Image (spheres, rainbow, N blue to C red):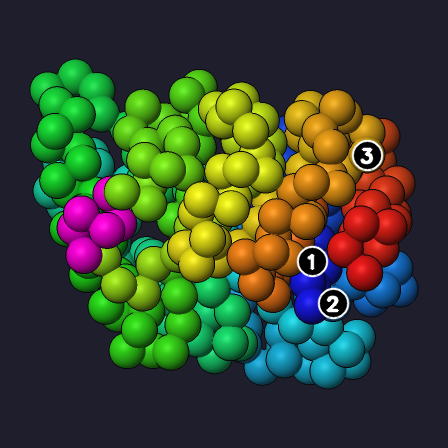
Amino acid sequence: MLQSAITISLVPQARGGPFVFWDDLAAGCEAASTLGFDAVEIFPPSPAAVNPATLKELLMKYNLKVAAFGTGGGWLVNRWHLTHLDAKIRQQAREFIRGMLDLAAEFKAGAILGSMQGKFEGEVTREQALAWLAEALQDLGAHALKQGTVLFYEPLNRYETNLLNRQGDAVSFLEQHRIQGVKLLCDLYHMNIEEADLAATLRAAGKHVGHIHFADSNRQAMGWGHTSAAPIIKALKEIGYTGYLSGEILPLPDSLAAAKQTIEAFRHHAC
Ligand code: LER
Ligand code: MN
């Protein structure tokens, strides 16, 4: 059984980004619950910004789970990432993600590594950046396993990173470096830019698929762009994927309409 989720951003610096509900965790949970989502995906400015007791109360009240916590706040708020030239910044990025994994473990959720992977530039070669990324993923993946959670590594499109843009390249990277405790976050928006065939790519990634960002080709709610959802869902069912389809999309034309279209598309295709 696939599960549905919708995003809530608590990061003012992310404004304009692909998140449906904004700024108010309680209001976001209430809206998600009213529409019938199984879970929320939360994008906090830091792990400490989430009060676990308050969040647990909200989840109980609204009968929701947490699908995942995003770590991109570490980049947007502090400009930290895992492949930065400065060793101190790389370390701060790693500790930020470790803290998010600890928080995620309390909620049986995963933590997402997207923009915090960084990119190679200036004095940092591609080879060096990938070596730092592999080392960080080995460390953080081992930590995730120890905590009983998982780190979702997200290949981003070419305009956001120059490290690994395609799912197949990420699978080879995880296998080559024997990285445990890390699964793929396949964002259908990034995939629409980078992959030749979304369904075939998901089938090939198989057991590595850990989380899905359920977005149409234009990063709007599924059904409002030109991606065909049906073959994608068929492929996910074939590989035995039972995780979330999480609406990480632009709040267009407004948050409520985007969320409503997401749950309708989910019900139409995934149930
Ligand atoms: C994060 O999940 C993502 O998809 C990035 O494009 C955010 O900028
Ligand atoms: Mn994404």
Residue visible at 68% across and 48% down? Answer: 233
Q: Earlier in the sequence, mark 3 or mark 2?
A: 2
Q: Is 175 inside the magenta-drawn segment?
A: yes
Residue 118 picture quarter: top left
Q: Earlier in the sequence, mark 1 or mark 2?
A: 1
- Residue type, numbered disc 2: Asp
Q: Badge 2, how many Cα within 10 Å: few under 14, some, many 20+?
A: many
- Which contiguous range is marked in magenta? 173-178
Q: Does 81 sit left or right of 211 as displayed?
A: left
Q: Residue 175 versus residue 244: which sits nearer the camera?
A: 175
Residue 54 picture quarter: bottom right
Residue visible at 16% across and 17% down? Answer: 122
Q: Secondary structure at mark 2?
A: loop
Closer mark to the observer between disc 3 and disc 1:
3
Q: Quadrant of the C terminus?
A: bottom right
Residue topped by disc 2: 38
- Residue type, numbered disc 3: Gly
Measure the C-alpha gap from mark 1 to mark 2.
6 Å
Q: Secondary structure at mark 1?
A: strand
Residue topped by disc 3: 223
Q: Badge 3, how many Cα within 10 Å: few under 14, some, many 20+?
A: some
Above or below, 63 relative to 176:
below
Measure the C-alpha gap from mark 3 to mark 1.
16 Å
Measure the C-alpha gap from mark 3 to mark 2.
20 Å
Residue topped by disc 1: 5
Above or below, 179 relative to 72:
below
Q: Secondary structure at mark 3?
A: loop
